């Protein structure tokens, strides 16, 4: 995939974001983060592993909220849900080693990668769910796809695959808007992309025969199964 030219789009991004005020649940620092206006992101293309290519501004760059004071970082949907027992873990393992950061108003792919990795570190030290770590790894694989870095894309795709398999067998559905059949499809697609045909076919097959799967996700599974044949 061609590298997306981020720098040439910076002028277009300014009116497409706004500042969202937050309070860190770990250190109670008040700060603001840039957020993408709901109408700003125009979809160009949807990939088979759910990666979406956007025009003008990329919402993925802004999916992590990170406290510049203590280093606590998480996906937007998780940021305020931190358990009290995890706050001490953050304070001991992140905050004490953290150097305060100042981020620009506009994020590019490299800043996004840094912030996703900080979120992944936070999830690791708080022993968070596999689905949480898997979703961050999946998005990191997408960020490296944007950069054209195949090695790191594959590394984080593999990490996402392992985490989602663990989540599939040990967590309740849905998570991050994905029901059981959607996760089955995604696992199959990640296997297909790494060249493990038999495993991919097995997971796609589960979707196709499922009574719970939607017609949309069944069609996606059939399409990917046909590619393998």
Image (cartoon, grey):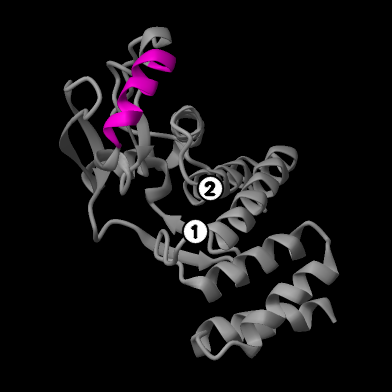
- Which one is nearer the viewer's eye here, 154 or 103? 154
Give the residue number, with chain letter if any, for mark 1: 171
Q: In this view, does 203 lie to the left or right of 176?
A: right
Circle 2: element type: helix
Circle 1: element type: loop
Q: Is residue 96 visible?
A: yes
Q: In this view, does 55 lie to the left or right of 167?
A: left
Q: Is residue 48 visible?
A: no
Residue at screen point 25% across, 37% down: 34
Q: In which quarter of the image is the C terminus?
A: bottom right
Residue 118 shows which numbered tag?
none
Q: Quadrant of residue 112?
A: top left
Residue at screen point 54% across, 91% down: 211
Residue at screen point 76% across, 65% down: 192
Above/below status of 122 relative to 8: above
- Which one is nearer the viewer's eye here, 83 or 104? 83
Above/below status of 165 relative to 75: below
Q: How crowded is mark 1: few (under 14 residues within 10 Å), some or many (20 or more)?
A: some
Which region of the structure is painted magenta?
A: 83-94
Q: Are marks 1 and 2 in contact (CB under 8 Å)?
A: yes
Residue at screen point 54% across, 81% down: 217
Helix, strand or loop for the magenta stretch, by majority = helix
Residue 212 on image: x %, y %:
50, 86
* Sooner in the amino-acid sequence: mark 1 or mark 2: 2
Determine if the magenta segment contains residue 84.
Answer: yes
Give the residue number, with chain letter if any, for mark 2: 130
Q: Quadrant of residue 185?
A: bottom right
């Amino acid at each position: 995939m061609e590298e997306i030219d981020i720098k040439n789009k910076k002028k277009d991004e300014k009116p497409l974001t706004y500042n969202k005020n937050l309070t860190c649940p770990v250190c109670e620092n008040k700060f603001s983060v840039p957020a993408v206006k709901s109408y700003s992101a125009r979809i160009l293309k949807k990939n088979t592993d759910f990666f979406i290519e956007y025009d003008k501004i990329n919402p993925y760059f802004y999916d992590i909220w990170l406290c510049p004071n203590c280093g606590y970082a998480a996906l937007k949907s998780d940021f305020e849900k931190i358990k009290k027992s995890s706050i001490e873990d953050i304070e001991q393992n992140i905050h004490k080693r953290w150097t305060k950061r100042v981020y620009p108003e506009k994020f590019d792919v490299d800043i996004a990668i840094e912030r996703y990795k900080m979120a992944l570190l936070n999830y690791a030290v708080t022993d968070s769910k596999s689905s949480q770590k898997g979703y961050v790894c999946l998005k990191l694989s997408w960020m490296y796809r944007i950069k054209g870095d195949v090695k790191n894309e594959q590394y984080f795709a593999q990490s996402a695959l392992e985490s989602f398999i663990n989540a599939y067998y040990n967590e309740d559905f849905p998570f991050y808007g994905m029901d059981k059949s959607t996760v089955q499809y995604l696992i199959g697609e990640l296997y297909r992309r790494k060249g493990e045909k038999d495993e991919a076919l097995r997971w796609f097959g589960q979707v196709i025969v499922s009574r719970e799967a939607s017609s949309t996700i069944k069609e996606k599974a059939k399409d990917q199964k046909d590619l393998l044949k």
